[in-house]
Image (spheres, grey):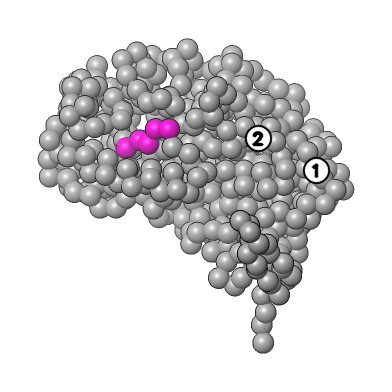
Amino acid sequence: MTTTGEQRISLEGDAVVEHRTVPVVGEFDVIVVGGGCAGIVAGIAAARSGAKTLLIEASSFLGGEITHGYQLNFGQPSFFHARKQLIRGITGEIVTDLVRMGGFIRTDGSSPVNPEMFKHLALKKLIEAGAEVRLYTPFSDAIVENNAIRGLVVEAKAGRQALLAKRIVDCSGDADVAARAGVPFEIGRESDHRVQPLNMTFMLGGVDIDAVIAYVKAHPDQFGMGLNRTILQEGVRPAIRVTGFFDITRRYADDYGLKVQYTRFGTVPAGDGKQLVYVNMPRAIHYDPLDPADRTRADLMLREQLLSVHRFLTDHIPGFAKSFIVTTSPWVAIRESRRIVGEYVLDAKEILAGKTFDDAIFRSAIAFAGSGHPHPVDGEEGAEGSTYEFAEKEWHEYEVPYGVVVPKEIDNLLVAGRCYSATHGGLGLAKSVPVMMAAAQAAGTAAALSMQADVTPRALDVKALQHRLVADGVYLPNVG
């Protein structure tokens, strides 16, 4: 006979009162919450550092915004700068493996990723690192005692269960664990707490890629340069990622209810590179990603908008006349929700100034200097004079400090992914997939090292962490 613990739920006035006994079903050194891009890397890093590691994920597969949200543009500005790879370590290793599998094509701009190959590789690498993975396991609550999280409560088909751990790494994307544990956090823009737009990406078949390439080459003034225009032809397999068709899109945007002032799409690495195109244009402005009712409304609106976007493409964009919808992203993609208040709060001005730090955990690059937020809260994305239109951009390398993954208040918690400690503007410039993965390697490694040294992550010897990261392939040029 099995049991999920005793429980009694009663209705008392306008409230429901719960009385529960929850069984403990596992004990670990490190539990990583969330199997997105950040969680995958944190789990690998912790396990490779010698910690008994568990990663839990609410859905049926790993990959986060790449596989759930079809955010298939692997932001190369944060990965390469001046043909030098900046973000290395586990992230670089994953990219190398994807290239070998045929699921990633390296470019000087932004590179497309095959989401199905990413799902497979992520699970494989976690298991090979020695981590345990539990899918179908939603986080429910944190067990907090004396400013530390003793464990987590999860609630799935097996019922309500508890998992104990010495260290927790919150890679939930929304800082769910941190918020439940009492860590202070901020949401969205400082003035009104509105967040960057939600979006839904979809895939098309039947696009004439050769017609697209011909048009882009014939009208270079209609496309952003650098990361916003990638046409790479490797034999018969091209990699295409464009943001542009500015004149056409702006002319017809109102007719089709478009929420962006550009057309953005890219190819998916599969077959000869001409079968699948992902389109990232539908936007939901001023919706709350933490409110299930509001997020549902955003889902419904985005699916309607998606059909309008496709009609616009077939009517006006070269190469799309015979295109058809193959699939839509399983989840709406979220750019921003909660951001923890950590030991350090990263600001946009520091990123644009190329600031370095004594406690740096990785180095990246940014190409948006002086040209505004790439995803403005109130819309007008891609409007004239916006960041996407400039032909030349000023580049800066910058570093991210350890303090952004160390939250206030709770002693044995680390946080990585888009909920790490930054201002609204800082997150807008430093939230690409490679950046989130690099921060997660530091968080996962710090979780294991702090446990082994019997100190809190806040008290960890950062030099020891940096040397371990360098030994594991992370690029930190100022670490001796």
Residue at image position (30%, 46%) is: 303
**x, y percent for residue 334:** 47, 40
The quadrant holding residue 133 is bottom right
The quadrant holding residue 21 is bottom right
Verify whether residue 340 appears in magenta: no
Quadrant of image for the N terminus: bottom right
Residue most toward the front?
A: 13
**x, y percent for residue 191:** 55, 22
Q: Which residue is mark 1?
A: 411
Q: Main secondary structure of the magenta part?
A: strand
**x, y percent for residue 307:** 22, 44
Q: Which residue is mark 2?
A: 185
Q: Nearer the viewer, residue 349 or 4?
A: 4
Which range of residues does the magenta coloring cover?
282-286
Residue most toward the right?
A: 454
Residue at image position (71%, 53%) is: 142
What secondary structure is found at the residue carrying circle 1? loop
- Total numbered labels: 2
Quadrant of image for the C terminus: top right
**x, y percent for residue 171:** 61, 46
Q: Nearer the viewer, residue 214 or 203?
A: 203
Packing grade of label 1 (10 A; few <14, some 14-19, many >=20) is: some
Q: Amino acid at mark 2?
A: Phe
Q: Nearer the viewer, residue 414 or 473?
A: 414
Q: Amino acid at mark 1?
A: Asp
The Cα atoms of the two marked residues, 1 and 2, are separated by: 16 Å
117 vs 307: above or below? below
